[in-house]
Amino acid sequence: MNVINPKSALLFILVTICLDSIGLGIIIPSFPILVSETAHVPIGQASQYFGWVMGAYAFMQFLFSPLIGNLSDRFGRRPILLISVLGMSLDYMVMYFAPDLWWLVIGRAVSGIFGASFTSASAYIADISTPDKRAQNFGMIGAAFGIGFVIGPAIGGLLSDFGARTPFLVAAFFSMANFIYGFIVLKESLPVENRRAFEWKRSNPFGALQQIKRFKKLKYLFLVSFLTILTTMCVHSTWNFYTMEKFGWTTKEVGISLAVVGVCFGVVQGALTGKIVAKFGQKNAAKIGLFLSIFVLIGLGLIFQGWMMYAIILPYAFTGIVDPAIRSIISGQVQSNEQGELQGIFTSLMSLAEIIGPPLFMWFYYNFKTSVPHSNIGLGTPFWIAAFIALLAFVLISWTLKGYAKSDNDSDSQPEGKELLNH
């Protein structure tokens, strides 16, 4: 295997992630319209189907993420990542031609299988990161996704003028370009001698989640991660419908707003996460992000004018420091040939939150808006429920990390992994 330059490798993988997220972001602004079109219902009624379509993606990602992670521990990151990206390209074409809602659901389900590329990408980052740079580099993943979601939704909003299906065709192009780029420039990050045997019992979601028990008190951080992603799903699943119905935004305006979200998240996670962690430590950075999340979610449910959505985006972007901080803490407790499995666990938890979150919050959204029509109470209810979940996560992480004394910034200090992790 060729020797990898860590900086070059990081750039390559971040560009790959960015191209992947462009493909995902392009379809977001027009996706509710396509659901409405394939379900043959008005846009207002499409919200009751939207959560289930999104859930199909997450359910398959939940099932296959541990498999993807364990395969990357066995065969290396590069081939698994490339197969995932190629599969996404082909599946966007299926959704482009989807004649009805069921085909769209099937397309999203297959996307979930190949969408587990995030697992391999995260493991790749862990492979090439030094302990003092791990949180910063995990933050860069978010930044790459953020940049993709600047470009993707903006393009998607413009392409929606040519029909709700056109963005899917362009997304297929970006994914194929991503595959070609990765095939040419991406080098392997896991040496053959560091790989481990493949085990089926650790490659299914339930077997993978069983591995959480190996971590003593830190195992509760996985639950914090799950709850954090669950609150994020509230924003992701309701943003389009909320802004369209409450403020009368067009698809193009939704795309622009999501592009702004992407810019802010990209700046925070790419430029500020490492500095925030260096200043406050991994533990406090995660707590700060969750504390902000509580108030942002309450605010989203209370605002009454469209411009306020933009005002709340920047503090919302700072909530993105939670995930890289938690990943960095736990990633430091496992061996290099277990990073794929660990990231598979995180992706499974993310997928589980995506399975539960969109249907749950869209159910709250649809039922409360119809029971309390034209009211902030009805439309804002999902955000307030998410704020309560964020509060639970904040209390849990405060208790979990109370005894976590490892210096976040001293890479030479002895990690508590041998005390916190059973071998």
Image (cartoon, rainbow, N blue to C red):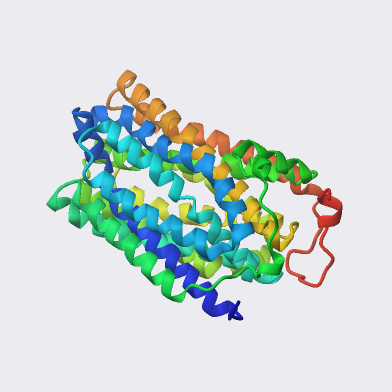
Q: Residue at x 53, y 52 (%)?
A: 319
The quadrant where residue 159 appears: bottom left
The quadrant where residue 107 appears: top left
Q: Residue at x 49, y 68 (%)?
A: 13
The quadrant where residue 71 appears: bottom right
Q: Residue at x 57, y 35 (%)?
A: 389
Front residue of this view, candidates 227 and 316: 227
Q: Is residue 77 above or below residue 128?
A: above
**Which percent across, then down, holds residue 382?**
43, 32
Task: Using residue 53 as the reference point, say whether residue 142 is left or right of it.
Answer: right
Task: Using residue 4 as the reference point, say whether residue 103 is left or right of it.
Answer: left
Front residue of this view, candidates 379 and 418: 418
Task: Using residue 109 as the reference point, say whether residue 157 is left or right of it.
Answer: left
**Which percent across, then down, holds residue 188?**
56, 71
Q: Is residue 298 above or below residue 114?
A: above
Q: Is residue 138 visible?
A: no
| Residue placed furthest toward the left | 162
Q: Is residue 50 above or below residue 124?
A: above
Q: Quadrant of the N terminus?
A: bottom right
